[in-house]
Image (spheres, rainbow, N blue to C red):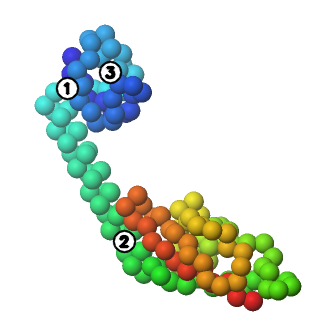
Amino acid sequence: MKVIFLTDVKKQAKKDEIKDVKDGYATYLINNHLAVAYSLGSVNVLNKQVKQRQDEEEARILECNKIRKTLENKNIKFKVKTGEMDKVFGSISTKQISEELSKMGYNIDKKKIEVLSDINTLGTHQVKINLHKKVSFNINVILTK
């Protein structure tokens, strides 16, 4: 019996995949809302859902690209306390960078900010921001006294 999977089923199929399975297993999948029976109506619904998800994904990518264009190669400045020989006390975290971006009007989660090396010396440091799988860019973090 052919079924359309509604969710990922481990070692069987991915979501939206159409697969031929045994009748008893198909009944189990349908009863547990893991799949629906294959028919022309269900295929049309599947195609509409896939198209809608693709459109939403493209819209998300466009929005991320707009943010990238405005923020790419921008500078974020932090004034830090220093000790002897200009050693910085502590380091700048992704949380602090995220908060500074929020003040600028961009709500970017700290988990999307990737610090390539510790930001614990005076000067300019490159920080990578991954807004989406397909959209990432660098910004400069500048530490001053």
| Residue 138 relative to residue 118: left or right | left
Sequence-earlier tag: 1 or 3: 3
Q: Position of residue 144 (x, y in %)?
A: 70, 88
Residue at (29, 17) in percent of width and height:
26
Q: Residues within 10 Å of mark 2 (few under 14, many from 20)?
A: some
Residue 35, located in which quarter of the rendered image?
top left
Q: Position of residue 107 (x, y in %)?
A: 53, 70
Q: Tell me the quarter of the image containing the N terminus.
A: top left
Residue that lies at the very extreme toward the top in this rendered image: 24
When the figure is inspected, residue 137 is found, relative to residue 14, above or below; the finding is below
Q: CA distance from mark 1 to mark 3?
A: 11 Å
Observer-nearest of 126 and 70: 126
Q: Which mark is residue 65?
A: 2
Circle 1 sits on which residue?
A: 38
In this rendering, which labeled residue sits more in front, label 2 or label 3? 2
Q: Which mark is residue 30?
A: 3
Sequence-earlier tag: 2 or 3: 3
Residue at (39, 65) in percent of width and height:
135
